[in-house]
Amino acid sequence: MITIDQLVKRRGSRTVLDQVGFVARPGRVTAFLGPNGAGKSSTLRILLGLDRADGGRALFGGRPYGALSEPLRMVGSMLDGSGAHRSRTARSHLAWVARSNGIPQRRVEEVLAEVGLADDARGPVAKYSLGMGQRLGIAAALLGEPETLVLDEPVNGLDPEGIRWIRGLLRDRADAGGTVLLSSHLMSEVADVADDLVVIANGRIVATGTVVDVTAGYADLEEAFFALTGVTR
């Protein structure tokens, strides 16, 4: 289980995260929703040990990310796209990531096939489209066969077929008992896959619960999002 417990983050005089707290449970897809700049990426960066909180905790099964001995075997994550140097190939990038955590090299070919990049793995990442870069980032997240996935805007740049594919992947992972946490600022991209919603606006959690709970009293998820966050259409 992912536990975010009263996170506080300040940048100068500005409070980026103000007592942010929620959980993402095994067997569920939890969508972390909010407009751009609401605090989603800051929360995920603290969760993944890439930034420090000024207060609170972010834990995987009761432990911070930095305390995991082989983190990629427990948590697969994607922030800011592929994370690969533009001069490298997808295969060489994934091979390096696998070696860093003692993951068998056979997994490189397996995940390339799983994300649909097997035929494009020899070319430099610089020639990849945005959607292909997203697929590479997801491949890296899957390398260690982790039970937990943390993905920031995973459908960014994907075409309709790619969006259907990622929805199916996330659903399958959760149905197999895994924990899935994904962030998005686009409601239509998570409406068909999420079990639970966490809505953040201006660094504060404004709603949590199942999709039914959060959308109660609204026509649909999109209307609920705009009303809860104060964002104008």
Image (cartoon, helix red, strand yellow):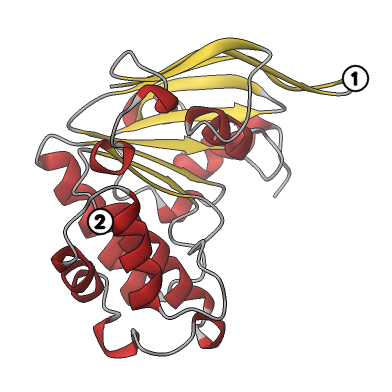
Determine which residue is flagged by label 1.
Answer: 13
Determine which residue is flagged by label 2.
Answer: 143
**Residue at 23% from the left image edge and 68% from the top image edge:** 108
**Residue at 25% from the left image edge and 36% from the top image edge:** 74
Q: What is the spatial separation of the Cα atoms under label 1 and label 2, in whole angstroms?
A: 40 Å
Horizontal relation, residue 137 to residue 226: left or right:
left
Q: In this figure, what is the number of numbered marks? A: 2
Cβ atoms at labels 1 and 2 below 8 Å apart: no
Q: Earlier in the sequence, mark 1 or mark 2?
A: 1
Residue type pointed to by label 1 = Ser
Residue 18 drawn at (x, y percent): 68, 15
State the SS at label 1.
loop
| Whether residue 74 is situated above or below residue 58 in the rendered picture | below
Horizontal relation, residue 26 to residue 163: left or right:
left
| Whether residue 179 is situated above or below residue 155 in the rendered picture | above
Residue 50 drawn at (x, y percent): 57, 36
Q: Quadrant of residue 118?
A: bottom left
State the SS at label 2.
loop
Q: Classify 10 Å Cα crowding around label 1: few (below 14), some (14-19), many (20 and above).
A: few
Q: Select label 1 or label 2 by which is in front.
A: 2
